[in-house]
Amino acid sequence: MSDKQAWAEDIQTAFSAQDIEASDGNLCATLAMVGQESSFHADPRVPHLASIARSELERRAAAAHVPEFLLGAALGLKSSTGQTYQQRLSAVHTERQLSELFEDFVGQVPLGRKLLSGFNPVHTGGPMQVDVDFAKAHDSDYPYPENGTTRHAVFTRRGGLYFGILHLLGYPADYPSPLYRFADYNAGWYASRNAAFQRAVSRLTGVRLALDGDLVIHGSTATSHTERATRRLADRIGLSDDDIHAALKQGKSQDFADSRVYKRVFALADKQAGERVPRATLPGIELDSPKITRDLTTAWFAKRVKSRWDQCMARTGR
């Protein structure tokens, strides 16, 4: 089997298993995202990964008040491969290698458990750089038998494609352009829709809001800036603070667009503007990762992928 054929079959399996239409647009979206994230490498190399990982270990050691010499001693121990952890760390080039190294270090070295406490610094991986936590939360219908964990599957071609395609195309979104779906891939499901809602609220209230797509602070009882601003509109939209909170909590799902809060806020925004205001906008998020060495944004990312999508669609003649 050729490499191209293997990629094609794994993509087709992901589409079929998730009941996603294998349209030109969807196929080009997948190819554009893989091209952007890994240039079609199942486990892409990351520049300076060893030094990034060592810096993370040193940071966590300092936070745990572990002397540097103890960290050095722990890394000097032999790992399950026969090499020392330091030797393996110095040789890592991919996130799969680093993830496996940290799992070994935590499982075998007491200091590793103290420093990391089950924490693995590798959060994304595979040909589509999909988020490991996302994959774990959506692995119930994973079609392949795996000897390892969902984390391990992410770093394979077929696993990375399955969960990446699910993240990219596995939710309904009524966007005028795939540009916004590409932004969501980076910022989270419905981030572009939610950013447009935040913009509408900001213009109606005069409150400056970060257009990040996060409507509530998940895992916290604190009230977000977006929720506080939306509450200022409570009388104008005829809804209570509780109504607003319940609706904003649906921000990660399609249901939010069907809520009275969403509909009434946009009705006010349309009336104020004298026209229909956009229901999608690119989130204003700066990308923050040790792997990123330039000032990049979600908008930059989405536009890069859209450019690849345009080129792919041109080749189809559509």
Image (cartoon, rainbow, N blue to C red):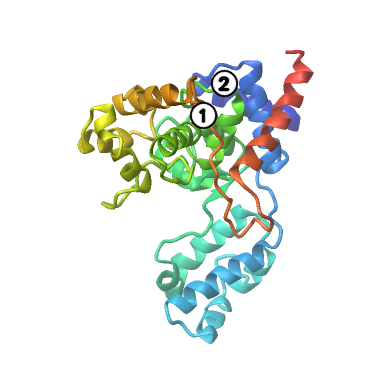
Q: Could you classify mark 2 by the number of other residues whose Cα lies within 10 Å: few (under 14), some (14-19), or many (20 or more)?
A: few
Q: Secondary structure at mark 2?
A: loop
Q: Secondary structure at mark 1?
A: loop
Q: Give the tally of numbered discs.
A: 2
Residue 255 point in image, percent of width and height? 35, 26
Instruction: Name the residue carrying label 1.
Output: 280
Residue 176 bears which disc, if any?
2
Identity of the residue drawn at 42% across and 74% down = 110
Residue 190 visible, this angle: yes
Residue 50 point in image, percent of width and height? 65, 65
Identity of the residue drawn at 65% across and 71% down = 87
Q: Identify which residue, 204 or 288, lies in the foreground.
A: 204
Residue 301: quarter of image: top right
Rendered-image quadrant of the N terminus: top right
Left or right, 127 with reference to 218: right
Q: Are marks 1 and 2 in contact (CB under 8 Å)?
A: yes
